[in-house]
Image: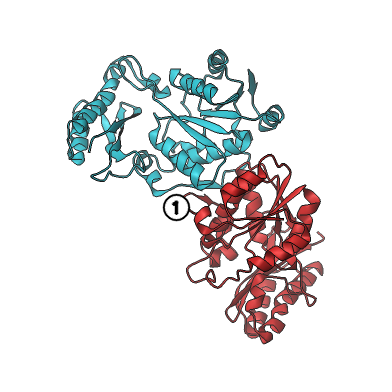
Chain colours: A red, B cyan
Amino acid sequence: MLVIHTIAELHVHLRGVTGIVLVPTMGNLHQGHLDLVRIARQYGQFVVVSIFVNPLQFGMNEDYSKYPRTLEQDCKMLEQCGADVVFAPSERDLYPQPQQVTVELPPIANELCGAFRPGHFRGAATVVLKLFNIVQPRIAVFGKKDYQQLYLMRQMTAQLNLPVEIIGSETVRASDGLALSSRNQYLNVAERTEAVFLYQNLVGIRLAIMDGATDFFKLERQAMEVLSARGWRVDYVAIRSQSNLAEPTACECNLVILAAAWLGKTRLIDNLEVLRDR
Amino acid sequence: MLVIHTIAELHVHLRGVTGIVLVPTMGNLHQGHLDLVRIARQYGQFVVVSIFVNPLQFGMNEDYSKYPRTLEQDCKMLEQCGADVVFAPSERDLYPQPQQVTVELPPIANELCGAFRPGHFRGAATVVLKLFNIVQPRIAVFGKKDYQQLYLMRQMTAQLNLPVEIIGSETVRASDGLALSSRNQYLNVAERTEAVFLYQNLVGIRLAIMDGATDFFKLERQAMEVLSARGWRVDYVAIRSQSNLAEPTACECNLVILAAAWLGKTRLIDNLEVLRDR
């Protein structure tokens, strides 16, 4: 496995390579990321994992500076999974000038997480577009954990006619159900115990929907109240259509429940797909 | 020469083709376009000319609906120039959904022509990015006639790490000096006679700068006054730095004079590069 730090070096090593699958990450890898790499191996001959903590997708008061950077350990894990290349560019290499050309996304990018993290998805889409152009993969794998991001990457790819297929991979969870996330390590012991309750809430809503509940506004509000009562600061709990992340019409069956909430200084997100009978 | 109308068909015909040079046009071709094709032939093995009148780059009250569409005649001219493929997609093929993912450009996109045509360059950049992704050229050729557009395409390409080299091609002029443009055919006989005066103004400013004039604001204002007095409605005359289209610093030598002005219902643009001694 090669670890490459510059675009120029990457171009030399990828010359003539076809069937590239890209797994874009911010590093600090856990089993969720390794699962993306496993999926990538199934889809293509040559797996490139990018590791870049992208300043463009962090807000002013977010955790860019304290986001965990663990390149050496990440590379060990990726070597064992059979990645072919780790691409870990410097900020200077990816943003030699202030980035003034960016990707403007559909209005849904300003809802859900976008409403609480202005510019986040623009920053994420812009760096992914740059990585696509640099790596030129045939396929890219993203986790469903970042459901809205996955949706927006699909939209970007379709609307910009990018020659890339986007694969969404299932969320990997701890044994208690908590979605794996690099940010979980910010949690203290008490918070870690409580954290699973976000997921349990989603499961509760899913059961209610499968039992025939249709007052989604009420389900959302109840979940937010319950979380708040337990000490969470809730950004949102929302039941949306899988197809466009809009509020679902009465006849839509493919739903997704999305939530974001803070435990102390840590913002956690999770989501759960629901197929309901109609 | 193949004339292709759908993305799917184009992909079939371009499979395995390398060294593609793209010449993006809106059709209604004149010698200026044919010169782009000639340059394209020098740079690559396989020349694709796209013809698409892009609604996204026209403003509400602009000439989208009356813009001349002359595909049959264009194809005859391109066949004689040795183009390999004409790609003339339908609006439905290029915009199957309302285009909600667009390219956000640097602030200079809102100056000069951008100040008078809000959203124009965003629309142009977005369709060019789509065409790049569809055609996957190694090189693309743009005319210097649309100087600000050429600059912004270079910026987009650099900042999005597109694997495309942008070639700028010299403006082709009529024997009297008027820059060739599809919009020239909107002019009546009297307007056509007057039209060359835009170019003559730029030449006058260039001479003044080469003679040592440094009060650019005065030169710009004089030119605008002279044009207005002759019946033009002037959008702008501006002396800028070639490197960033900003107002030039005292020590910059590579300048460009840009102008846009209306003769009756026709908006004409032109520009002239100036190298001054310092």
- Judge the density around disc 1: few (<14), some (14-19), many (≥20) Cα neighbours within 10 Å: few
Residue B242 percent across, percent down from the top left: 34, 38
Q: Position of residue A257 (x, y in %)?
A: 70, 66
Give residue A208's quadrant in the image: bottom right
In the displayed structure image, the side of residue B157 where residue A180 appears, left or right: right
Q: Which residue is pictured at 77% across the width and 68% down the height?
A: A209
Which image quarter is the N terminus of chain B in? Answer: top right
- Tell me the quarter of the picture where residue A30 sits: bottom right
Image coordinates for residue B103, horizontal then vertical, percent: 51, 46
Q: Where residue A126 appears, x then y in whole percent?
A: 55, 53
Mark 1 residue type: Gln
What is the number of callouts on the image? 1
Q: Chain of mark 1?
A: A
Local secondary structure at mark 1: loop
Q: Is residue A254 visible?
A: no
Q: Which residue carries the number 1 mark?
A: A97
Q: Residue furthest bottom?
A: A190
Left or right for A75, reference B62: right
Q: Is residue A190 above or below residue A45?
A: below
Q: Residue at x 46, y 43 (%)?
A: B155
Q: Nearer the viewer, residue B143 or A147?
A: B143
Give the quarter of the figure containing the C terminus of chain B: top left
Which residue does the image show at 66% across and 46% down from the upper left?
Answer: A13
Q: Is residue A193 visible?
A: yes
